[in-house]
Image: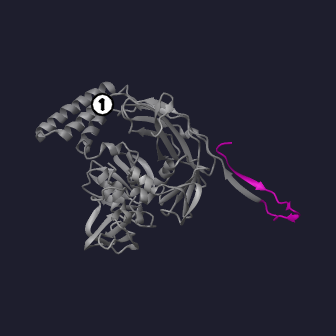
């Protein structure tokens, strides 16, 4: 049966005439949970849709915790999924409550299928996954809702207007009044809209000053969670940065801070709180906060060339196991699991058993050949190839944290060396001698001026194309 956590007693006896030990032996096992019901659709607009997932309806026994929801959505042609359009991401669950999904990266006038599956933790150790739920099909509208269109007018006005500040404020007030009026007539009939006109007006006026600074494209990604705070305490809190004008700016501050793996950004105060836990110790709803996972942002920006460089087909990262999960269909799902798991630096997927193994080293303890294995280093994925000019510090050595050295023809190949070197977070490269140094600190223990050297933070590279 599905969702069973059981013990199976093995009674003593004989094998080939030899008495077995007198004590009973016990084997413990758990079965996968049933799949949640198909997502219940809420509001559907031109580029986003909301859903409720009935997590509470899935029963699990003692010792089993509902931990993660895997969300999969894809474009559809008639009744068939469109090949290559699938996007998968993972969302942590809060105390087993029903989950609210807000998918905000959809195309206008397009048919989509949405499915979910549940991952549970057994005795705080192994992860087991259900199969995917039945599919819910939606079709986005061809044009935005009245509220969305007026918000777009505000965005476009702020970015393009060359009027004086007085004229700009006047037109902003006019557009905000129009938005409030539209909301009054639209509010009651629109599922999932803001509950009251006063709340809507306040939200628009408070957020208007930072609308453009916060990239719309990034907010639509699955790496930023709007309206939730990643709570941490003690040593997991790595300090607060002031005068930060966007989520990307906040993530760049995190990328330059050793041990930082996530942020919570507050646009009203332009503050950025840096965290040492990828999804916080707990995640809770909080208005005017956008939280983001550095590993998610850095690896999702990877190019096709990076995928070709980093994906190792028929290679197994042996050892350095962190945890594993059955029921993982592809390497993208396996990486999504890694992104939200603290300490995960690499993955191996056994495609035959559909088991994803998370590693605490980029390439495990060793690499072996395996016909059913596909492996990826997270550090490699974060080091997006291409232009490194934004991240490179010219005539500078990151000193005091060197953990390896080699000779490489280019700084790009030096970065590739670091991506598979355990605990390597940055490189220093000399163009004439072709000397390549890997460092354990993102900005080195110190920075020294030295002609011909260039130094690069690996996580900065991953964020270069994140917007």
**Residue 203 lies within the magenta run:** no
Q: Please identify the quarter of the rendering in which residue 130 is found.
A: top right
Q: Where is residue 259 shown, x and y percent of the image? A: 40, 63
The residue closer to the viewer here, 285 or 427, is 427
User: Neighbour class for label 1 at 10 Å: few (<14), some, many (≥20)?
Assistant: some
Residue 125 visible, this angle: no
438 to 343, vertically: above or below: below
Q: How is the image coloured?
A: one colour
Q: Secondary structure at mark 1?
A: helix
Please state if 361 lies on the left or on the right of 128 as rendered: left
Specify whether 279 is left or right of 389.
right
**Residue 445: horizontal and vertical position, in percent?**
34, 72
What residue is drawn where x is 30% and y is 28%?
146
Q: Residue furthest right?
A: 17
Vertical placement of residue 438 versus 352, above or below: below
Percent x, y of residue 152? 26, 35
**Which range is magenta?**
1-24
**Whether residue 130 can be seen here:** yes
Residue in the image at 26% along x and 30% along y: 180
Q: Which residue is mark 1?
A: 147
The image quadrant that residue 145 belongs to is top left
| Residue 129, image x, y percentages | 58, 46
At a point 36% along the width and 56% down the height, the residue shown is 385
């Amino acid at each position: 049966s599905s969702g069973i956590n059981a013990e199976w007693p093995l009674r003593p006896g004989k094998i080939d005439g030899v008495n077995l030990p007198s004590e009973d032996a016990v084997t413990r096992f758990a079965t996968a949970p049933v799949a949640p019901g198909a997502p219940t659709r809420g509001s559907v607009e031109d580029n986003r849709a909301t859903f409720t997932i009935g997590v509470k309806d899935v029963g699990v026994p003692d010792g089993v915790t509902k931990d993660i929801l895997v969300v999969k959505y894809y474009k559809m042609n008639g009744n068939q999924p469109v090949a290559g359009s699938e996007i998968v991401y993972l969302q942590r669950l809060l105390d087993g409550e029903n989950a609210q999904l807000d998918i905000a990266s959809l195309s206008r006038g397009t048919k989509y299928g949405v499915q979910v599956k549940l991952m549970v933790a057994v005795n705080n150790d192994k992860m087991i996954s259900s199969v995917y739920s039945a599919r819910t099909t939606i079709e986005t509208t061809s044009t935005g809702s009245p509220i969305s269109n007026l918000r777009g007018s505000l965005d476009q006005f702020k970015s393009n207007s060359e009027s004086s500040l007085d004229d700009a404020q006047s037109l902003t007030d006019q557009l905000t009044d129009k938005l409030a009026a539209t909301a009054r007539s639209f509010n009651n009939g629109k599922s999932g809209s803001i509950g009251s006109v006063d709340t809507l007006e306040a939200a628009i006026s408070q957020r208007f000053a930072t609308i453009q600074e916060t990239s719309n494209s990034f907010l639509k990604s699955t790496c930023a969670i709007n309206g939730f705070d990643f709570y941490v305490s003690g040593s997991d809190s790595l300090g607060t940065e002031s005068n930060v004008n966007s989520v990307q700016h906040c993530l760049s501050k995190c990328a330059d801070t050793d041990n930082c793996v996530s942020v919570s950004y507050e646009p009203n105060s332009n503050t950025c709180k840096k965290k040492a836990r990828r999804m916080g110790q707990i995640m809770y709803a909080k208005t005017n906060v956008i939280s983001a996972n550095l590993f998610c942002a850095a690896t999702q920006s990877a190019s096709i060339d990076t995928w070709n460089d980093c994906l190792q087909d028929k290679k197994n990262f042996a050892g350095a196991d962190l945890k594993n999960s059955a029921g993982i269909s592809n390497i993208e799902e396996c990486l999504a699991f890694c992104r939200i798991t603290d300490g995960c630096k690499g993955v191996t997927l056994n495609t035959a058993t559909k088991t994803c193994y998370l590693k605490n080293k980029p390439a495990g303890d060793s690499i072996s050949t395996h016909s059913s294995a596909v492996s990826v280093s997270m550090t490699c994925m974060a080091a997006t190839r291409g232009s490194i000019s934004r991240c490179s510090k010219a005539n500078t050595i990151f000193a005091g944290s060197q953990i390896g050295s080699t000779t490489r023809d280019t700084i790009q190949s030096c970065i590739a060396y670091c991506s598979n070197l355990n605990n390597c977070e940055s490189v220093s490269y000399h163009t004439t001698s072709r000397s390549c140094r890997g460092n354990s600190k993102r900005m080195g223990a110190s920075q020294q001026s030295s002609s011909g050297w260039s130094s690069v933070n690996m996580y900065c590279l991953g964020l270069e194309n994140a917007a």
